[in-house]
Image: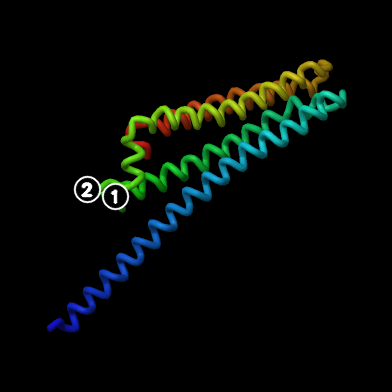
């Protein structure tokens, strides 16, 4: 016969399991949502750069915009990296709180230890980095062809060049963060 105390413990255990399941589901949903935002950021970068490059080839007065566009791409790349860090944090929490040290590892632990995880992760960062940096270099380079040696052009060219360097540094930092042994 079970006592009232045993039923309370059983009820508390069921509530805790329900909470843990809800937390796990919320974290998995967060990972999916953040990855979707990352994909949309790359798509937005490609679409907007296509429009700006096409206009830049037709309209001569777009030089200043072309020189400054790498700054906007830097912020898109920062958003992409920010969401990537969120994915890493959620994955780490799942690995530590839900999968634990048991032999029955879940997806996060299995993926992290899989031999293809590292090359796949490198390719993911490289592909997005390539999009951001290529778009920046193309628009900035086209802007330089319309450079007129005005003070404003010098400032915009310097800002665009600095944004390209900052994007490169950001992507290198994110790649190292993603490849670190603890991976957050």
Is residue 22 or residue 78 the one in the foreground? 22
User: Where is residue 27 shown, x and y percent of the image?
Assistant: 43, 53
In the displayed structure, does residue 28 sit left or right of residue 112? right
User: Residue 26, relative to residue 13: is it above or below?
Assistant: above
Residue at the outermost left position: 1
**Residue 117 placement: quadrant:** top left
Verify CB contact (< 8 Å) between mark 2 and mark 1: yes
User: Where is residue 133 shown, x and y percent of the image?
Assistant: 61, 25
User: Residue 75, relative to residue 12: is it above or below?
Assistant: above
**Residue 111 placement: quadrant:** top left
In the displayed structure, does residue 158 sit left or right of residue 183? right
What separation in Å lies between label 2 and label 1 (alpha carbons)? 7 Å
User: Which residue occupies 61% across, 29% down?
Assistant: 132
User: Where is residue 74 shown, x and y percent of the image?
Assistant: 62, 32
User: Which residue occupies 47% across, 41% down?
Assistant: 85
**Where residue 102 is drawn, which disc sits there?**
2
Is residue 178 or residue 169 the one in the foreground? 178
User: Residue 146, relative to residue 53: is it above or below?
Assistant: above
The residue where tag 1 is placed is 99
User: Residue 61, relative to residue 5: is it above or below?
Assistant: above
* Numbered disc total: 2
Using a 10 Å C-alpha cutoff, classify the residue at mark 1 as few (fewer than 14 neighbours), some (14 to 19) or many (20 or more).
some
**Where residue 8 is drawn, which disc sits there?**
none
In the displayed structure, does residue 9 sit left or right of residue 147? left
Quarter of the figure that contains the N terminus: bottom left
User: Where is residue 155 shown, x and y percent of the image?
Assistant: 74, 23
Element under label 1?
helix
User: Which residue occupies 56% across, 31% down?
Assistant: 128
Element under label 2?
loop
In the displayed structure, does residue 183 sit left or right of residue 38? left
């Amino acid at each position: 016969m079970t006592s009232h105390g045993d039923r309370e413990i059983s009820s508390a255990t069921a509530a805790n399991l329900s909470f843990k399941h809800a937390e796990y589901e919320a974290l998995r949903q967060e990972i999916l949502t953040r990855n979707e935002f990352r994909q949309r950021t790359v798509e937005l970068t490609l679409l907007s750069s296509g429009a700006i490059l096409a206009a830049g080839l037709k309209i001569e007065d777009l030089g200043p915009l072309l020189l400054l566009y790498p700054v906007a791409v830097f912020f898109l790349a920062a958003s992409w990296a920010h969401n990537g860090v969120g994915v890493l944090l959620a994955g780490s929490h799942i690995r530590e709180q839900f999968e634990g040290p048991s032999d029955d590892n879940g997806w996060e632990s299995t993926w992290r230890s899989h031999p293809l995880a590292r090359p796949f992760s490198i390719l993911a960062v490289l592909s997005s980095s390539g999009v951001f940096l290529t778009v920046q270099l193309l628009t900035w380079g086209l802007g330089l062809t319309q450079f007129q040696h005005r003070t404003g052009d010098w400032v915009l060219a310097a800002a665009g060049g600095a944004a390209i360097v900052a994007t490169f540094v950001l992507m290198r930092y994110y790649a190292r963060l993603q490849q670190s042994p603890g991976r957050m």
